[in-house]
Structures are given as structure tokens and as C-alpha cells.
Amino acid sequence: MSDIIRRDPRAEWIARNRLHPLHAAMQPVQHSWMGPNGIIRKNVHGVGFIGPNGIKRIDRSGAQQGGATKRTAAAEVQLPLHQVPQPAFYISVVPDMVGGRLSSHDRDLLGLAHQLAGSEGAVLAVVFGEHKENAFATAGVDRLLVLDGEEFSGYAPEQRVQGLRAVDNQFSPRHWLLPDSRTGGGELGRRLAATLGERPATRVWQVKGEECIGRAGAGLQDLARPLARLILAAAECAEPVSETRHEALPVELSTSVARSLSRIEDLGAVAVDPGAIPMAEAEFIFSGGNGVKDWALFHQTAAALGATEGASRVAVDDGFMARDRQVGASGTWVTARVYVAVGISGAIQHLQGIGACDKVVAINLDPGCDMIKRADLSVIGDSAAILQALIAAVEAYRNEAKRDAA
């Protein structure tokens, strides 16, 4: 046997790539570490961890003993409260809020804003219209300004720029941060820069001191420039806030926003066939596996929910779904916001393919399968009965909405 220590380049690449589904598995397990505020953090999910209430965490998953899977509620950890009573300055952030919630890109942006604000500044989040987010405090928002109104609904970039100009006049933020994305932040940031007469720093992925580094040359080169007042940041520009809990105090504008005469008429969203959406771009995927016995009911449920259909490899091999609908390492890697797995036990290749999904819902008869362990929400029972109840609930909700509209 040779004594030469051989490197695994693929494993090293996965360990560096935060977007890879196996990135977390390649990281060494840390039982304690020091956070950015000097607070020693402990891994609350580790076996044997003693929480603030004196309860010791015990492994009830059955993985070590080989027993049946059982779930236990972990003790909730109260994060330290970060308060800024009298901010010396503001860092304004305009998140995309796709679907009314903070995306991973938005949370990275708030992490960068918290880095620029330090201990004296406050992070001001500007949100347009109604939202469904209730975790602004843990995302790093010190002040929350919601600009609601009919004039800000739909595609109204000119009106939103007017609102941001009013925010700029009242709060005079030291920096403006917007996501350099295709979901609105990139366009809105460039419009705001033209209105304020600022030269924005685009595709920024790192900020060091008084210098920001952005992508250039089709993403193959880095461009360093002095720290700009208006920053359009790329995904993973900073670590999301996770060590502190913020106040998220609501604030209001002291003056009304002037209504601009829009030159663009928003005709609303265009209906798209969910089956025509590529799997890699779908945000809501309804996937079936070997546990599905009534495929006609499965297709009916997917149509009622307006979801893109997917399948496991077993379902594809059995001919129930087309090959381009296969999800997993041997099929398509998906990044859906919601992934519903019906009758899928959770093979390692399938779990790799859904590793980047935000929320996973599992419907299965086996409470000990790997998909149940991965899921954020699990429903244990017969899939046919659950799908029929789901269709009935969707139809009841839509009928009630129609009666309210009438």
C-alpha cells in the first residue's frame, strides 16, 4: 500500500460551493463556535446538548439504536436582542419579497446591510405592498417601512422609485442595497441610481472595508472599486443574520408619495401552463413516487393546485411519468420554493436533487422513511384519501373567495 495521501478534488469543490446540496454534509461538525458579536454559540441540534432550561437533548430518531423514528420538539433558543435606540445612520435595503416573503437572496442582502451598519447604524427595510413575512426580526431588520397602496401594486417601477426617493429625502441612508436579480431588484436599483445621480456598484459579491468587489467579464473576473452609496448585490454577498434578534420597529414616511403618471400599463400576470415550466425553474413542484397508486387522482390534484408535476426515478422507470419529469441526482436538480413529495421514500439521489428546495412537504404511509426526516411538514396516511381531501379543501377555498368577491 502506498503512503501517499490522496486529495479528492470533487469533495473539496463541494465543500467550497455553498449552493451544492451536499455542501452541509461536507462541513465538519462543530459543537461550539464564536459568533460575530463575540458570543459563544453552541450546536443546539447536537446529541447531549443541555438547553437554557436544563433539558438535555436526546437522540430519539432511532438512527443510533436502529429503532423506529420518533420526533421531539427542540427547546427554542432565545437569541440576544440587538437594539439601536438612536441610529447614527441608516442602511436601506429593498428586498425583492418574491411571493410576499424574504428569499435567500434577500437574507444575504440583509446580512451585508448588518455588516455595513455595525453597532451604530440601523438596517431599514423598505417593503412594497402586502407581505406574508413574519421573520423580519431574525433576518436582521431594525426598522421596517411598508409602502402599501394601490399605486405600488403590480409592475410599477416609476411609482416605486418615487417612494424610494421620499425615503431618501427623509432618512438620508448612508447606503442603498438592492438585490441584483431578475425578479425586480436589478431594474429598480438601476432606475433609482439614474434618479439619484449615483453610479451603482453592480453584481457585488463581497465588501471589504471601503472597497466592494463585483463580478465582471461574464462572471469570470472580479472588479474592485471604492464602496458606492448604491449597491446591487449578488446572491451570497454575505452571511445571513443568524446570531441576533432585531426589533423590526415600524416606521412611516412623514410626507405623502407623489403619484407619478405611469407610461406602462400592467395587465396582470399571464396564465402559464405549469406543465410547460422547466423543472429547474419551477417554484411549486408536486412530485409522485412508488407510493402513488391512483395516477389519475395525482394529475387531478396537481392541476387543482396549479403545480408543476415531477416524479421519482421508480415512477419514471415504471412509465407513469416522462423522463424529463424525473427529480434527483440522475434527473433534474430543482430549487422550488415548495416541493410536495407523494409516496416517495427518499432515496439519496432524490434527496440530493431537492437539497436546494426551501420547503418540503411529504405525504407517506411510512413515518420512518428518509423523506419524512427531510420534510418540513409531514402527513402520514393513505395518499389517495389525502389527495381527495386536498382537492376538496382547494375547491372550498376558491368557492369562498368567489363569494367574497361577489
Image (tube, helix red, strand yellow):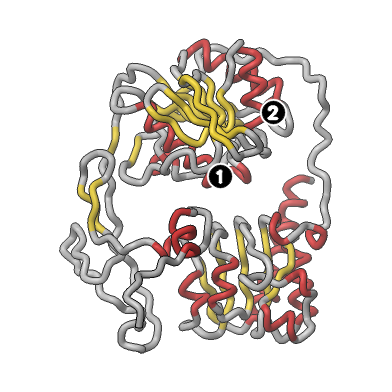
Is 60 displayed left or right of 201 in the figure?
left
Q: Quadrant of residue 392?
A: bottom right
Residue at image position (40%, 22%) is 210
Contact between labelled residues 1 and 2, with CB atoms less than 8 Å apart = no
Of the 4 image quadrants, the one containing the N terminus is bottom left
Front of the two marks 2 and 1 = 1
Q: Secondary structure at mark 2?
A: helix
Kindly identify the residue that appears in the image at 67 percent across and 21 percent down: 191
Q: Which amino acid type is shown beneath numbered disc 2?
A: Glu
Quarter of the image for residue 137 reads top left
As displayed, is residue 86 above or below residue 107?
above
The disc placed on residue 150 is: 2
Q: Residue at x 21, y 61 (%)?
A: 51
Residue type (three-letter) at the residue carrying disc 1: Arg
Residue 228 visible from this viewpoint: yes
Looking at the rendered structure, which numbered label has been put on residue 101? Answer: 1
Q: Is residue 105 left or right of residue 57?
A: right
Residue drawn 44% across the image and 17% down it: 174
Find numbered disc 1 in the image and state the secondary structure of the residue it sits on: loop
Residue 124 placement (x, y as % from top left): 45, 27
Looking at marks 2 and 1 on the same chain, the residue that comes earlier in the sequence is marked by 1
Residue 185 vs 369, above or below: the answer is: above
Residue 126 can be seen in this image: no
Measured as percent of width and height from the top left, residue 148 is found at: 60, 29
